[in-house]
Amino acid sequence: MSQQEKEQTIALSAIFQAAELVATLAKTGKLDKNYLKPLIDSILVVNPDSTEDIYGGQWDCKSNLALGRRVARQALGKERASVNPDTLRYALSLIHLESKLAKEDAILSALGKGIQQLDRQKAHYDDVLHENMMAAVSGIYQDTLSTMTFRIQVQGDSRLLQQPAISNQVRATLLTGIRAAMLWRQLGGKRWHLIFKRKALLNALDAR
């Protein structure tokens, strides 16, 4: 097991955590904020000393990404059938969308400017999950990723998805998934690895 594979599982866990939270939120209107917070925090970590620092450091990473780690293990292992199909679709869609984003310099620039502004805005709130912060993160997603040809179609309870607070949380969580997918690619992760390197990734997930 290489160091690269260990780090890739951090990104992969974050992708699946974001995907699972979106799937749950879209159908129930609820999510575990303990799992959302480290994802939102990760957007504001621009120059980390290590991959682990993006999601809270080596001592917190396992607990902060516990949901995504569990779902990733199920998805890559023998329990794939137990994973919500929407979660799998969102996870793969996040990886695909980020690969398209990587070729869009103007959108990447706008994304960077939006995150800089978000970092300044954070100083006005005690909680990164404050509804105004979530609306701001959602706005960044709308202004950038929602303008691309390929879009992630979220399925769920339309009555819930029409509520501004929930739709903001959905878009904000999707943006955290894009951040994780970007990390996955930067660490050498590719979509085909989920098929042909499953055993190595599972071993790394088990070792975390």
Image (cartoon, helix red, strand yellow):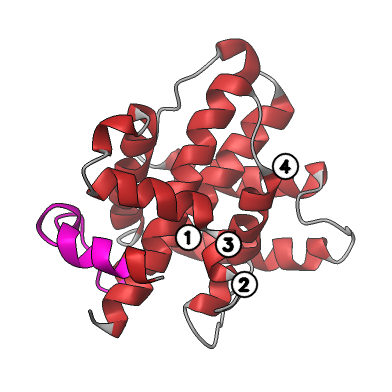
**Residue holding disc 2:** 56
Q: What whole-number distance in Å separates the C-alpha atoms at marks 2 and 3?
A: 9 Å
Q: Residue at x 55, y 73 (%)?
A: 54
Which kind of residue does numbered mark 2 sit on? Gly
Quadrant the N terminus occupies: bottom left
Give the side of residue 57 with respect to residue 180, left or right. Answer: right
Q: Residue at x 32, y 41 (%)?
A: 93
**Residue 103 in picture, x, y percent from top left:** 30, 61
**Residue 85 in picture, x, y percent from top left:** 32, 28
Secondary structure state at the residue bearing disc 4: helix
**Residue holding disc 1:** 179
Give the side of residue 138 with respect to residue 121, left or right. Answer: left
Secondary structure state at the residue bearing disc 3: helix
Quadrant the C terminus occupies: bottom left
User: Marks 4 and 3: in contact by CB < 8 Å?
Assistant: no
Which mark sits nearer the N-terminus, 4 or 2?
Answer: 2
Which mark sits nearer the N-terminus, 4 or 1?
Answer: 4
Q: What whole-number distance in Å separates the C-alpha atoms at marks 4 and 2?
A: 23 Å
**Residue holding disc 3:** 63
